[in-house]
Amino acid sequence: MNMRALVYHSPQNISVEDVKVPEVGEKDVLIKIKYCGVCGTDIHIYNGDGGAFEVTPPLIMGHEFSGTVEQVGSQVKKVNIGDVVTVDPNNMCGECYYCKNAMEQFCENVIGIGTTFDGGFAQYIVVTEKQVFKFKEGMDALTAAMTEPVSCCLHGIDLCNIKLGDEVLVIGGGPIGLMMLQMAKMAGASKIILSEPVEEKRELALKLGADITINPLEEDIEAVIKANCKNINAVIECVGKVHTIDSAIKCAGKGATVMMFGLTGPDEALHVKPDIVFKKELKLTSSFINPYTFERSIAILESGKLNVRDTITDIVELEECVKVFEDDKYRRSGKVVIKLND
């Protein structure tokens, strides 16, 4: 059986074409994919920068997806045909040093769906049962497709150690920044500031829980913080640019955690003044993929307490999706989701 899929052949060389649907093994699940989100990692792969793991083309990208179970192998027990499901794209070996020491995100033998193994920009996918997570009956597939980015954000929020009453600055009002500000509020932050140059994103941020928004192209971020905050306890950088990381360090308060969440290019370098880090006793950290957070992400989405639908600005049909990678306007607007099946 054939299906349609978006295939990456080389940097800036992708096409929608016919490929074979993989065979279903006894421990496998065949999923009819409904939606797959476009991640910054996919853009990096498209541009030849690589993703979280080494990429070998030809490859079907895509790791933020949901769908319904179409077929199950003879030994599959936890899902049934028709279930709405999502997939943790990181299949860890469970045997290496890092897996055995509670650092599975650094697994030496990881299989990365959409990075080292064909992923979700296809009408169907076959994955091992242990990677499949079922949603409660009635869950909509579009929300379910956001589980993977939510799980990554949740790992980042955990590392920020936000306490009740903390003041938090989020830099970047894209889909990730808008999820982060909601999670910071859930974690107990008393004041959340969002820095974002696009007016529509700032307006949405206020709707989703930001207390103050700043246009960094027209306002002095440090001056606004000084006038409205006692001490920024955590800064979450969601842009992935050297100048925004530099701004995050400058804006951080005494004893703050600076979370470098945005993905920079592999050759970009940050020039940090150790004196600033020393005098403010900063904790500079980052977040790599989504260890141990997938079940919690599903619980948050099923609760309805996290609004991911409003971060989605474009739903593009598979046959038209090449333009999403070629035209920067899609990445400037918000979250883009590819529709694979009706």
Image: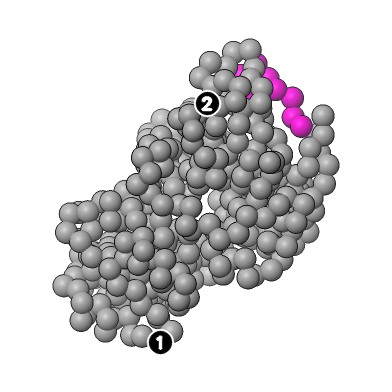
**Residue situated furthest top in the rendering:** 74
Q: In which quarter of the image is residue 342?
A: top right
Q: In this view, does 236 lie to the left or right of 24?
A: left
For label 1, the residue is 218
Sequence order check: which comes first, mark 1 or mark 2? Answer: 2
Q: In this view, does 281 lie to the left or right of 178?
A: left
Label placed on residue 130: 2
Residue 133 rendering spot, x and y as whole percentages: 50, 31
Does 6 lie within the magenta span? no
| Neighbours of disc 2 within 10 Å: few (<14), some (14-19), many (20+) | some
Circle 1 SS class: loop
Identify the residue at horizontal 61%, vertical 46% (top origin). Answer: 36
Residue 209 rendering spot, x and y as whole percentages: 31, 61
Name the colour scheme.
Answer: one colour
- Which sits in the foreground, 331 or 90? 331
Per the rendered image, the range of residues in magenta is 21-29
Q: Quadrant of residue 219?
A: bottom left
Q: Main secondary structure of the magenta part?
A: loop
- Which sits in the foreground, 212 or 120? 212
Q: Quadrant of residue 177?
A: bottom left
Identify the residue at horizontal 38%, vertical 44% (top origin). Answer: 304
